[in-house]
Image (cartoon, rainbow, N blue to C red):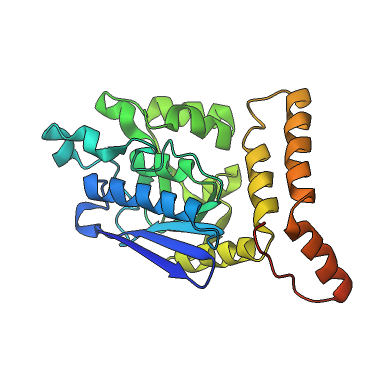
Amino acid sequence: MLQVTRVGDHVLLVKINRPEKRNAINAAIAQGIGEAVKLSEEDPQIRAVVLSSTGDQSFCAGADLAEVASGNHAALLTKEGGFAGIIEAQRTKPWIVAVDAPAYGGGLEICLACDLLVASSRASFGLPEVKRGIYAGAGGVFRLPRRIPPAIAYEMLVTGESISSSRAYELGLVNRLVAPGEADAEALRMAQQIAECAPIAVQQSLKVAKRADDLDETELFAAMREAGCLVRESADAKEGTKAFLARRKPVWGGR
């Protein structure tokens, strides 16, 4: 139900493979994604992760309602990552989500937990929970307003209506918009672009950028200087300079 594959030396592909259940999250998938997060963080060779799913009916339908109805909802969470093993996970590596089908409810919340989003023209996005008497409690209520203009996010949250992938691209939720069937390939290309950059510089850049909405400028400058010190003192910074002067491709060690 979950395929985890190393693509090349530095990219991990994590694919939900449960199309007959609209790729809904069950206990096994939640545990597997949580383990993939841990693997990506512990393996210094992994520099970027792509998360995708199979089928063209649903990227992910959110929680498996059969497990919820059976009273097994807690099994859909992990201690470190929360729902689906990723919603609350603490990560330093970039995650790219590839969406080739509608992503509603928990499916969109999984997308919002990732850093970058590649979508095909047959994808769409929505948080329809209010239509069912519930709400987007896996991060959607606060992450969506951070990723698109708040007024549009508020409308989606209180009406439960969805938007197309082209509209999501216009609003900045989607990084790259591709033809049906091309989302995985484009996400892997993006992951390879990341993998060709210095790992420490990438991780520290992402770390500071993620705090932009939470800190004032004085705090952000302090965080930036702290990150900059780590980057400048790294062996990769020295390697980058040497490679530039020698007109060769740098060999990053992640140190």
- The quadrant of the picture occupied by the N terminus is bottom left
Q: In this view of the protein, can residue 181 be seen by the observer? A: no
- Could you say where residue 152 lies in the image, as x and y percent from the top left? 53, 31
Near-viewer residue (175 or 75): 75
Q: How many marks?
A: 0
- The quadrant of the picture occupied by the C terminus is bottom right
Side (left or right) of 183 relative to 190: left
Residue at 18 percent across and 39 percent down: it is 65
Q: Is residue 216 above or below residue 97?
A: above
Side (left or right) of 8 relative to 83: right
Q: Residue furthest right?
A: 245
Side (left or right) of 232 relative to 25: right
- Could you say where residue 31 lies in the image, as x and y percent from the top left? 29, 47
Residue at 64 percent across and 44 percent down: it is 206
- Could you say where residue 146 lies in the image, as x and y percent from the top left? 57, 32
Residue at 39 percent across and 59 percent down: it is 14
Residue at 23 percent across and 50 percent down: it is 28
Q: In this view of the protein, can residue 163 be seen by the observer? A: yes
Q: Is residue 145 above or below residue 101?
A: above
- Could you say where residue 250 lies in the image, as x and y percent from the top left? 74, 70
Near-viewer residue (169 or 183): 183
Q: Is residue 163 above or below residue 97?
A: above
